[in-house]
Structure formats: C-alpha cells, structure tokens
Image: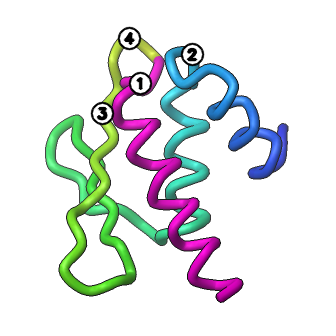
Amino acid sequence: MPGIEEIVCRMRANPRDVRFRDALRVARHYFGPPRVRGSHHFFSMPWRGSPLVNLQEGGGTAKAYQIRQLLAAVDRLERERHA
C-alpha cells in the first residue's frame, strides 16, 4: 500500500486519475474523519472561516476539481505548520 506522500505526488501529477479511497486516505490523514452525507464526504479545515473540502466518488475515482481543492488545503496546512 503506497504511503501518503506517494499518493499526494500522484495526485499532483494527475488529479483526474485518483482513486476515491486514496483521496479519502489523504484527507483523513491531514484533516481527520469526515462527516458523511450520502456519497459526500466533508472534511473541516483547521483554520477559521474556511470552507469544507468535499470529496465525492465518481465511478471509482475522485472528481478532479475536488482533488485540486484537497491539494490546495494540504498545501496551506503544510505552509502554516512550517511558518
């Protein structure tokens, strides 16, 4: 099973071809457990006034725009940790 860093690298390289379960694994690693409503998995961000990151499966893969939103949130979290 690939590690979180490897999955994130693959997500950056091709956000259109990310398995939904891999996206969930990354989101849970960084943001904890989601709130689930139907097929939507909502992750709360740790900073004030921030929107939720939503992941929704589309045929076994995550939606590309949601992967880009997840990567932006991961990048912000990493920047704030190292600031």
Q: Secondary structure at mark 1?
A: helix
Mark in front: 3 vs 2? 2
Q: Nearer the viewer, mark 3 or mark 1?
A: 1
**Callouts 3 and 4 close, C-beta under 8 Å:** no
Height in image: 57 above or below 67? above
Position of 48 with respect to 67 (left or right) is: left
**Residue tagged by mark 1?**
64
Q: Secondary structure at mark 4?
A: loop
Residue extending furthest front?
Answer: 83
Mark 3: which amino acid? Gln
Task: Residue 69: give x, y in percent of width and height.
Answer: 39, 45
Q: Which comes before the other along the chain, label 1 or label 4?
A: 4
First-in-chain label (3 vs 1): 3
Question: Which residue position holds label 3?
Answer: 56
Q: In the figure, 24 relative to 60: above or below? A: below
Amino acid type, mark 4: Gly
Residue at the spot 61% in from the left edge and 74% down from the top edge: 79
Quarter of the image with the C terminus is bottom right
Q: Residue at x 61, y 64 (%)?
A: 29
Q: Nearer the viewer, residue 27 or 73?
A: 73
Tag 2–tag 4 contact (CB < 8 Å) = no
x 42%, y 67%: residue: 33
Q: Residues within 10 Å of mark 2 (few under 14, many from 20)?
A: some
Q: Which residues make up the magenta segment?
A: 61-83
The image quadrant where one finds the N terminus is: top right
Q: Are marks 3 and 1 in contact (CB under 8 Å)?
A: no
The residue tagged 4 is 59
> At label 2, which amino acid type do we have?
Asp
Q: Which residue is mark 2?
A: 17
Q: Position of residue 50 (x, y in %)?
A: 24, 72
